[in-house]
Amino acid sequence: MNLKRHLFSLLIITALTVCIIAGCSKKDAAQNATVQKSSNEADLNKSDADYLEAGKTSSESDETLTKITLNEVAHSIFYAPMYAAIENGYFEQEGIDLDLVTGFGADKVMAAVLSEEADIGFMGPETTVYTYNEGSADAIVNFAQLTQRAGNFIVAREPKDDFTLADLKGAEVLGGRAGGMPEMVFEYVLKKNGIQPSEVKIDQSIDFGSTAAAFSGGKGAYTVEFEPSATALEQAGDGFVVSSVGVESGYVPYTAFSAKQSYLDNHKDLIQSFTNALQKGMDYVTSHSGKEIADAIKNQFSETDLETLTMIVDRYHEQDTWKDDLVFSQESFDLLLNILEDAEVITKRAPYEKLVTTTFAENAKTK
């Protein structure tokens, strides 16, 4: 009886011990689960907080920049100061998120500005004269001039150290679009040298971006090309630069930035900031070597190696392509009108004060 009672007591103690151990294990497990859950929630909350903070930072960063859509007439090393401003971050410094679009022709750039697909157009200022003369109620106004010489070159099939413009008489030349600045300045150069355009077989039927390929394919005795097409023809052995239209023409207001008068009126601070960034780009190219400029803008021309890019920049530098400032003077505008009249593409002269403002450029050069 005592033995049974002893065994019964032992069984009860064992059972209680198991229950206590099990209870403790469950309690520890619960506590561990609670701790792990708290830890996971803390990590999750930390991650969420980091994500939200990053999103907030990105959002705030986006909010500090104002987007501007700029439509350029072509993508050429000729416009190096603008690309220096882009690549060196000058637009961001001025609070601008720049969206650069290539229109491939002044007519297309103007259409984009008129339809408000673009805020600002970069093209030959002759297009603003055409639009004004057609009776546009909201004039497209030039507010910054970038280049002061033509940027194209006469390319021959053979090297000619003794080339003169008289060699073009009777020859087939792949020219530019009728009424466009490249073609009109080319004709202006011919007339300056006593040659009538009718004495040259100028082919104006080929698209701006296709003349180099057509020349490589055997069409024409000469072609008029911008960079990098001129140098690419030389490197391929398909052509040789024999003359610079920019040197032959002298100073002309070749390309400028323009916008609707209403846009300028409603976004004065933004246009000033845009012009400030451009002036910084202009300052950069006038104070740095061709190699430094090429290195700065190389991301814009990934298909062109650095050595070639440097050579092209040097070529433009040597002919004094870029202005020191962005001011579009009345003298330059009058010369433009003379070229347009000489080409017989206008019958009346547009007023300078309606199509040009120098306020933004004057302010930019004093900063």
Image (spheres, helix red, strand yellow):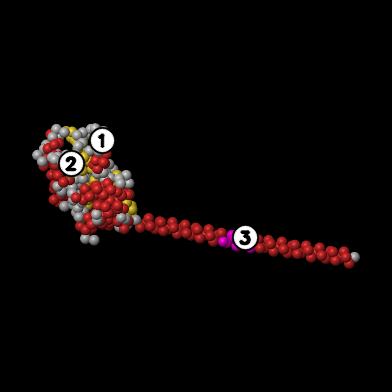
Q: Which residue is at 41% across, 58% downward? A: 57
On screen, 46 above or below 343?
Answer: below
Residue 128, image x and y in percent?
21, 45
> Residue 45 versus residue 85: which sits nearer the camera?
85
Q: Which residue is at 32% across, 51% downward? A: 98
Read off the residue under disc 2. 242
The reply to whether the C-beta atoms of the residues labelled 1 and 3 are less than 8 Å apart is no
Residue 110, image x and y in percent?
25, 44
Residue range in magenta is 31-39
Amino acid type for the residue under numbered disc 2: Val
On screen, 259 above or below 154?
Answer: below
Q: Nearer the observer, disc 2 or disc 3?
A: 2
Q: Report, in whole angstroms, how far the alpha carbon at label 1 lies from the one at label 3.
A: 76 Å
- The residue carrying pointer 2 sits among few (fewer than 14), some (14 to 19) or many (20 or more) residues within 10 Å by Cα, namely many
Q: Which residue is at 15% across, 34% downward? A: 200
Residue most extreme to the left: 194
* Residue 29 quadrant: bottom right
Q: Identify the element where label 1 is drawn.
A: helix
Task: Give yes or no for residue 355 being in the magenta stretch.
Answer: no
Read off the residue under disc 3. 33
> Residue 244 versus residue 277: which sits nearer the camera?
244
Give the numbered dot on residue 196. Answer: none
Amino acid type for the residue under numbered disc 1: Ser
> Residue 292 versus residue 87: which sits nearer the camera?
292
Considering the whole magenta stretch, tell me its main secondary structure: helix
Give the numbered dot on residue 216. Answer: 1
Q: Which residue is at 53% across, 58% downward? A: 44
